[in-house]
Amino acid sequence: MTPLVRPPALSSAGSGIDDRSREIFRRIVENYLAHGEPLGSRNISRILPMTLSPASVRNVMSDLEEAGLIYAPHVSAGRMPTERGLRFFVDAMLEIGDPSGDERAAIEAQVKAASGQPLEGVLAEASTMLSGLSRGAGVVLASKANARLKHVEFVPLDPARALVVLVGEDGQVENRILALPPGLPASALTEATNYLNARLQGRTLGELKSEIEARRDQIGGELDELTARLVEAGLAVSVEAGGARQLIVRGQANLLEDLNAAQDLERIRLLFADLETQKEVIELLSRAEGADGVRIFIGSENKLFSLSGSSLIAAPFRDSRQQIIGVVGIIGPTRLNYARIVPMVDYTARVVSDMMLKRDG
């Protein structure tokens, strides 16, 4: 069973409904998720496993509407779930299994095929793959500071500045500009380079910075004061810049398929605007990093999707030390097929974690 992070307490509005009401509510939600359309009492009475007249169904629907779980989009129309209703369905009624054999094979094959690429390429491939399988937008969030280092070098630019060159084990190279302490001898750059490279051993920037800070007193005995300051300043500027969040989004065009009305097009336009605001997307995905499993964000529960009425399903992935280093997920309309996509996202996160274990091993 896929781990799904559920809130500790369900909505009091929905937790007390009886079995008959739950069955009617389930039919309304499943019809909405499949077709995006309201379902009327006459059609519900025909598909229920028990005998119930349309009038009796309407009475139950009235109670569900009063509880805030369903609503009528038009006068004399059927009913659709509200966002509150979708949240209750996901938290209390959603049955989750495993991805199909074909889906598992596709996920494994695509991530494996990209395993020889730099980490960014692997994550982009995972995002593209999720987008293709879900017909939503695939998203991946990772921290650049999580890349394991192969080499660090301080290169002089002028008397006041140096370039910190970071070479990752995956072959990626990044540069940082560092202000130099006044009076620093040229030999200090070479000495700082040698000192750090002797201690890298495949560590991340964050891990190396933590170790140097923990050994600050010892460093004072190994390096002169200015060189020790250079080592700490170089790591600090590297971590600050490298800690920037890397956001990858693929498959936005999928969200333009099967639009039924002008309001759908407007919703997608607003969602595209949301995705352009990377800061808020990153903030939302970061909330999923604290979860030991899949998290679901529905519509206006978060400010990012308050206008576009979209949903996000996301799960964290880990490195070889079992530390969470990023998130994979799917963004789409609130009528996503949650039962199918939740295990798909979870399985992708696990496959990416396994790939990270092999890369680091």
Image: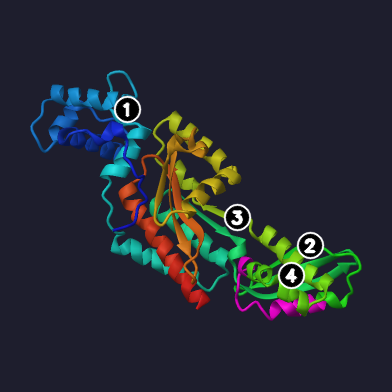
Mark 4 vs mark 3, CA separation in Å: 19 Å
**Secondary element at image label 3:** strand
Quick one: label 4 or label 3, which is nearer the N terminus? 4
Q: Residues within 10 Å of mark 3 (few under 14, many from 20)?
A: some
The three-letter code of the residue at mark 3 reads Arg
**Secondary element at image label 2:** strand
Q: Is residue 201 magenta?
A: yes
* Extent of the magenta region: 190-207
Residue labelled with disc 4: 165
**Secondary element at image label 4:** strand
Quick one: label 1 or label 4, which is nearer the N terminus? 1
Residue labelled with disc 2: 177
Closest to the observer, 262 or 127:
127
Residue 199: image location, x then y, percent: 66, 78
The three-letter code of the residue at mark 2 reads Ile
Quadrant location, the N terminus: bottom left
Quick one: label 3 or label 1, which is nearer the N terminus? 1
The three-letter code of the residue at mark 4 reads Val
Circle 4/circle 3 CB separation < 8 Å: no
Q: Residues within 10 Å of mark 4 (few under 14, many from 20)?
A: some
